[in-house]
Structures are given as C-alpha cells and as structure tokens.
C-alpha cells in the first residue's frame, strides 16, 4: 500500500480516537534532519506519521513488528529499516547511514523501546552516533498522551485521548575521534535526551529529571 494512502488511513483513525495538539512545527527544517522522540506507547509511530507531511522518511522499526498486521503495513509503506534490537545490527546501521547520505528525515526513538515507567529511560548512543556521522541536526519531539494504558482505558469508555507533540529547536551533535570518544558519545546522548526532557512535563522526565544539563536547559528557556 502506498505511503500517502497509509498516512490518510492513519490520520482518519487518529482523528476518531484522539484529540491531537501539535506545537513547534516551525522548528522542523525543510531539509535533512533527525527527529528524536520519546517512546511511550504503540501509538507513537502513528502520531508522528499523523503530524509529518513528508515522504522522505527514514525510520528503523523493531523486526518483531515486520509481520504485524498494522505496524508491518506502516513499516512497508515507508520502506522501514527492520532492526534487531537484541544485538548489534550492523547491517541495519549501514543501511540507515546509506539512506541518510541520500538525504531525508530520520525518525527515531533514542530509548529504543517503549518505557514501562511512562517516563524517559536512558537513551542509547546510536542516535548521537548517527547525528555526528551524518551531520544532520537533531530536532527533539516530545510526545505525551500515547501511553498504552491510558489509550486503552479511553477506548473502553469511548473517549478520545488527548495527545500532544511538541517540537524543539534543532541543534548539532559533534563527537571527536580518538581517545574519549565513547565518553563524548555518552555526553552527546545525554544532550539529546535532556533537550527532550525539557519539552516534557516533569512527571515524564524519568532518569533525566535531576540531570545537571537539563537544569541548564530549563534555565536558558526562561531567560
């Protein structure tokens, strides 16, 4: 099924089950960039497709969803990169970099999996690596309201779920080669996650709630 058709179906369904608020869309560049979002529930991918009006999307999706009736269809429609989350999937990484060299918009959740606590988990370093390697700017997009528990409960009571997507400003990640590279990658990952945390209400900030870099970013926002 063509991407435009799938996106129309997704938007139709989302309008039935949710009230979607979008903030900061003016922060999304027209060219190449990495959209990094938090991962709360199964609707995260759908809401991003609902919001984004582009077809040059590069999106890794967990391989376990390849044969799923809904997520498999979504993945095939955007020519997803199927990713093995349980081991170092170098073939998928090479494919992602190859596509990024050709241009487009990378959509990825740095946490790698849905949060069981409904708040930020520790980010994985792959996103920082891809941002540094490609030269793409990173745009943090914070999602709220997509938690599986809340969505299911609202569906049971025929209520629409309030979902918000809040995009921050783009920034660049640089990781030097040589000694200290792994530490620099960890710090770059924390930078990405703290920018995400700054866009989220306090209860969603999880392991980054007390991070010194988050405190700095929040102070900068009020200046």
Image: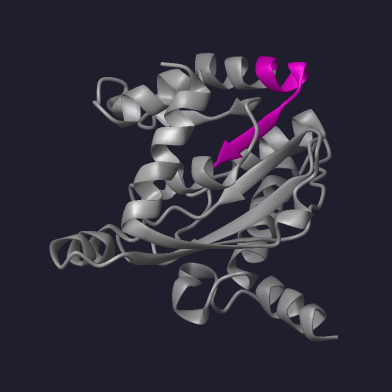
Q: Is residue 129 above or below residue 41?
A: above
Could you say which quadrant of the image residue 108 lies in? top right
Question: On the rendered structure, is 197 left or right of 119?
Answer: right
Q: Closer to the camera, 111 or 68?
A: 68
Residue 117: x %, y % from top left? 32, 66
What is the quadrant of the N terminus in the image?
top left
At x 32% / y 21%, what residue is drawn?
66
Looking at the image, the residue that sits furthest to the left is: 156
Question: On the rendered structure, is 46 left or right of 170?
Answer: left
- Residue 88 visible to an observer of this rendering: no
Residue 166: x %, y % from top left? 61, 63
Could you say which quadrant of the image residue 26 lies in? bottom right
Question: On the rendered structure, is 68 left or right of 60?
Answer: left
At x 69% / y 45%, what residue is drawn?
185
What is the quadrant of the C terminus in the image?
bottom right
Could you say which quadrant of the image residue 214 lies in? bottom right
Q: Which residues make up the magenta segment?
A: 98-108
């Amino acid at each position: 099924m063509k991407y435009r058709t799938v996106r129309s179906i997704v938007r139709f369904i989302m309008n039935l089950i949710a009230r979607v608020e979008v903030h900061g869309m003016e922060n999304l560049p027209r060219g190449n960039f990495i959209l990094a979002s938090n991962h709360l529930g199964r609707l995260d991918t759908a809401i991003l497709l609902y919001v984004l009006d582009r077809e040059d999307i590069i999106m890794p999706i967990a391989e376990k969803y390849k044969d799923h009736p809904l997520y498999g269809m979504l993945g095939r429609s955007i020519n997803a990169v199927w990713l093995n989350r349980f081991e170092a999937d170098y073939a998928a990484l090479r494919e992602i970099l190859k596509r990024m060299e050709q241009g487009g918009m990378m959509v990825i959740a740095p946490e790698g999996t849905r949060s069981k606590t409904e708040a930020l988990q520790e980010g994985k370093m792959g996103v920082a690596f891809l941002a540094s390697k490609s030269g793409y700017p990173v745009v943090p997009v914070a999602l709220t309201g997509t938690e599986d528990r809340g969505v299911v409960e609202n569906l049971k009571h025929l209520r629409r779920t309030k979902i918000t997507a809040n995009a921050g400003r783009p920034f660049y990640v640089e990781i030097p080669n040589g000694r200290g590279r792994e530490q620099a990658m960890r710090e770059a990952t924390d930078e990405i996650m703290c920018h995400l945390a700054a866009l989220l209400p306090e209860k969603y900030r999880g392991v980054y709630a007390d991070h010194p870099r988050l405190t700095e970013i929040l102070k900068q926002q009020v200046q």
